[in-house]
Amino acid sequence: MRPKLSILLLREGGWWVAQCLEYDIAGQGKTIDDALYDCQRMLCVHVVACKENGIEPLEGLSPAPERYHKLFQQAKVLEADPPRFRMPKGMPPPWMQAERAVRLCG
């Protein structure tokens, strides 16, 4: 089964933040693409670390705080298709094809 990831993009100061809703993991960058890439990188680090330690990927990570879920419901679906997550070799098979829903807040 392919994991589904909901990503909220929001502007904080001069930075973009990409907040994953299913897991309280976020990335940031000066551009939307950079923020999405940083969020992907953080997810990959967790999944690979779990795999190396014999733990179910992302086990024990809570969902993002409720305020992000509310913002996601009010946010616009990102019209431009953001770049696909570039999963590194060695990721467990279901994570190689993670499905994303990305919405832009503001």
Image: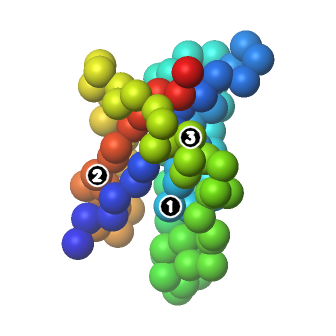
Mark 3 is on which residue type?
Leu
Q: Residue at x 29, y 21 (%)?
A: 79
Q: Secondary structure at mark 1?
A: loop
Q: Is residue 100 left or right of residue 70?
A: left
Residue positioned 42% across, 49% down in the render: 6
Q: Is residue 100 above or below residue 63?
A: above
In this rendering, the answer to whether 11 lies above or below 8 is above
Instruction: Give the number of the disc on residue 99.
Output: 2
- Residue visible at 64% across and 22% down in the picture: 11
N-term mark: 2 or 3:
3
The residue to which callout 3 is attached is 71
Q: Are marks 2 and 1 in contact (CB under 8 Å)?
A: no
Q: CA distance from mark 2 to mark 1?
A: 12 Å
**Label drawn at residue 22:** 1
The residue closer to the viewer here, 40 or 5, is: 5
Residue type beneath disc 1 = Glu
| Contact? badges 2 and 3 (CB < 8 Å) | no
Q: SS for tag 2?
A: strand
- Residue 32 coordinates in the image, percent (x, y): 51, 22
State how the image is colored.
Answer: rainbow
Is 50 situated above or below 41?
below
**Amino acid on which disc 2 is placed:** Glu
